[in-house]
């Protein structure tokens, strides 16, 4: 019986699976949502602040073995006037990333309300808690560093969420949330 040829001229192209993962980014203004999204998707960091008006949207394709994962990332402006757009960034999302600024503890306190509202719209999304501006935390008082670390760990535990500290300016842990989402999906 003849066997099919597997030579270079007769090779069958590999079939690739494709999965789309919708990700919502929420948190107060100026915590670094847009910076994280742009750094992750385009590997660009702009130190100038640009206010997000409404919702920004970017996509990134990541190939893992025979699967292409397309991350569709929606970044919601953090000003309270955009709260009515929260469903755009959360409903239908597989992952919701809650961001706070490690140097401004009030932004961590705000996570309670962001989480309450987002969870009310989508209780099946995987939550991830992200502390931004990790590179600036090092310059602060060690006692404050310990306090914000402990408090953010408590928040993450209550949310049943992984906790990631990152810095877009120094490219620290930018890819980390991708690892958290991949194993949970």
Image: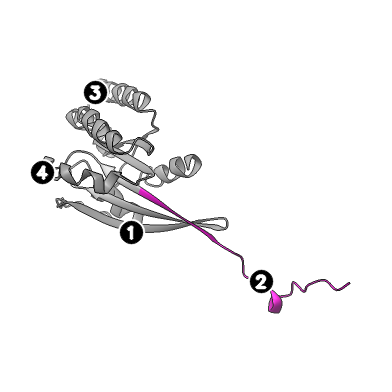
* Label 4 or label 1, whichever comes before in sequence order: 1
* Label 2 or label 4, whichever comes before in sequence order: 2
For label 3, the residue is: 144
The CA span between labels 2 and 4 is 54 Å
Q: Secondary structure at mark 2?
A: loop
For label 4, the residue is: 81
* Label 2 or label 3, whichever comes before in sequence order: 2
Disc 3 crowd rating (10 Å Cα; few below 14, some 14-19, many 20+) is: some
- The tag on residue 42 is 1
Disc 2 crowd rating (10 Å Cα; few below 14, some 14-19, many 20+) is: few
Residues marked 2 and 4 touching at CB (< 8 Å): no
State the residue in front, 133 or 51.
51
> Can residue 46 be seen from the camera position used here?
no
Screen quadrant of the N terminus? bottom right
Asked if residue 21 lies left or right of residue 132, the reply is right
For label 2, the residue is: 12
Disc 4 crowd rating (10 Å Cα; few below 14, some 14-19, many 20+) is: few
* Label 2 or label 1, whichever comes before in sequence order: 2
The CA span between labels 2 and 1 is 33 Å
Q: Is residue 5 depicted above or below 131 in this figure? A: below
* Label 3 or label 4, whichever comes before in sequence order: 4
Q: Is residue 83 depicted above or below 8 in this figure? A: above
- The tag on residue 176 is none
Give how far across and how far down residue 87 sits, in percent. Answer: 24, 45
Disc 1 crowd rating (10 Å Cα; few below 14, some 14-19, many 20+) is: few
The CA span between labels 2 and 3 is 59 Å
Q: Which residues are magenta?
A: 1-22
Occupied quadrant, residue 45: bottom left
Residue at the spot x=66%, y=71% of the render? 12
């Amino acid at each position: 019986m003849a066997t099919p040829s597997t030579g270079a001229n007769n090779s069958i192209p590999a079939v690739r699976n494709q999965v789309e993962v919708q990700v919502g980014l929420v948190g107060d203004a100026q915590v670094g949502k847009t910076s994280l999204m742009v750094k992750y998707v385009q590997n660009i960091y702009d130190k100038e602040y640009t206010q997000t008006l409404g919702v920004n949207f970017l996509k990134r394709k990541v190939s893992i073995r025979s699967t292409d994962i397309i991350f569709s990332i929606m970044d919601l402006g953090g000003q309270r006037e955009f709260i009515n757009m929260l469903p755009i960034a959360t409903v239908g999302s597989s992952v919701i990333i809650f961001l706070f600024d490690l140097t401004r503890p009030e932004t961590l306190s705000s996570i309670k309300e962001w989480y309450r509202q987002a969870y009310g719209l989508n209780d099946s999304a995987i939550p991830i808690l992200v502390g931004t501006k990790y590179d600036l935390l090092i310059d602060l008082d060690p006692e404050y560093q310990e306090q914000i670390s402990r408090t953010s760990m408590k928040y993450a535990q209550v949310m049943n969420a992984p906790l990631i500290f990152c810095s877009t300016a120094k490219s620290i842990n930018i890819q980390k949330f991708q690892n958290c989402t991949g194993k949970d999906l």
